[in-house]
Image: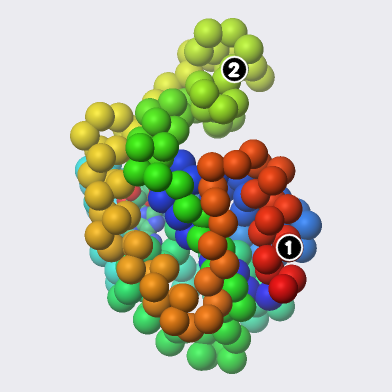
């Protein structure tokens, strides 16, 4: 089974994706994380990617697709792939369709985690992570035990450069303009499963399982 998980930043895509990956042994293709990892390398490609991420802008489609192609393999499609953070606009959705044809596979369902703009903004502003061990927190939904210190290694938590002030707004605006049209596209294709993302993690997980098996 191949799935896409779609929703605004802060909707809990990563959390739900990990639960599904664990349950079904899918290959997890997390677009944003793959790009962030590449952006840390001191290569021309890494630096180019970092310049887009730090401004909150989308990385150009062709770069994104070239990067992702390296993960689109027979083996991964055998497991089933869960796409998170890709596609992010209509052009990427069409490029993905072209790639899928090469493997004679389709996207079975698109899970749309819907939360409001205000909720998304609130959740993003509360995100923190540990610069040393990488553990993620949310000051509202998953706070550390002591102030803003990592539970695991005690380091001072930090905010991602693209999760501060104006960059957050830029990312949410791009989501509304570029990514939201995908909801209509997948609805027309009859594969969209819409879930209210403003429920508990467990309630959302159960609703996804129920609606996917319908
Ligand atoms: P995320 O953590 O998924 O919000 O992604 C962080 C950043 O990575 C985004 O703000 C973009 O700059 C970049 N990015 C992630 N996924 C894509 C994509 N499918 N296409 C282009 N850029 C992306």
Decide which of tag 1 and tag 2 comes sooner along the chain.
2
**Are there few (<14), some (14-19), or many (20+) residues within 10 Å of tag 1?**
few
**Of 195 and 20, which appears nearest the observer?**
195
**Of 75 and 47, which appears nearest the observer?**
75
Q: Quadrant of the C terminus?
A: bottom right
**Are there few (<14), some (14-19), or many (20+) residues within 10 Å of tag 2?**
some
Indicate whether 127 appears above or below 168: above
Left or right of residue 84, residue 53 in this image? left
Label 2 belongs to which residue?
Answer: 144
What residue is shown at x 26% (from left), y 54% (from top)? 174
> How far separated are the C-alphas under marks 1 and 2?
32 Å
Left or right of residue 203, residue 61 in this image? left
Colouring mode (rainbow / by chain / secondary structure / one colour): rainbow
Residue 18 appears in the figure = no
Q: At which x and y percent is residue 42?
A: 34, 45
Question: Cβ–Cβ below 8 Å for labels 1 and 2?
Answer: no
Q: At which x and y percent is residue 90?
A: 32, 74
Residue found at the very far top of the displayed protein: 146
What residue is shown at x 66% (from left), y 19% (from top)? 152
Left or right of residue 105, residue 84 in this image? left
Q: At which x and y percent is residue 71?
A: 54, 69
Q: Secondary structure at mark 1?
A: helix
Residue 211 appears in the figure = yes
Q: Quadrant of the N terminus?
A: bottom right
What residue is shown at x 48% (from left), y 19% (from top)? 157
Please tell me the numbered disc located at residue 27.
Answer: none
Which circle, 1 or 2, is nearer the viewer? 1
What residue is shown at x 59% (from left), y 12% (from top)? 154
**Of 125 and 208, which appears nearest the observer?**
208
Q: Secondary structure at mark 2?
A: loop
Q: At which x and y percent is residue 2?
A: 62, 74
Label 1 belongs to which residue?
Answer: 210
């Amino acid at each position: 089974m191949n799935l896409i998980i779609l929703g605004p930043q802060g909707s809990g895509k990563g959390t739900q994706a990990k639960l599904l990956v664990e349950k079904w042994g899918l290959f997890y293709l997390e677009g944003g994380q793959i790009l962030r990892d590449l952006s840390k390398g001191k290569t021309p490609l890494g630096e180019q990617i970092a310049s887009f991420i730090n401004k909150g802008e989308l990385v150009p489609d062709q770069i994104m697709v070239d990067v992702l192609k390296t993960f689109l393999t027979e083996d991964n499609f055998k497991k089933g792939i869960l796409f998170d953070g890709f596609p992010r606009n209509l052009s990427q959705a069409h490029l993905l369709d072209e790639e899928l044809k090469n493997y004679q596979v389709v996207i079975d369902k698109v899970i749309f985690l819907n939360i409001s703009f205000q909720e998304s903004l609130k959740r993003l502003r509360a995100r923190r992570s540990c610069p040393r061990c990488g553990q993620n927190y949310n000051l509202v939904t998953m706070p550390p035990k002591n102030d803003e210190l990592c539970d695991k290694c005690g380091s001072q938590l930090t905010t991602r450069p693209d999760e501060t002030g104006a960059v957050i707004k830029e990312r949410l605006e791009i989501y509304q303009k570029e990514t939201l049209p995908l909801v209509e596209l997948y609805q027309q294709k009859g594969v969209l499963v819409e879930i209210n993302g403003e429920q508990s993690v467990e309630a959302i997980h159960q609703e996804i399982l129920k609606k996917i098996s319908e």
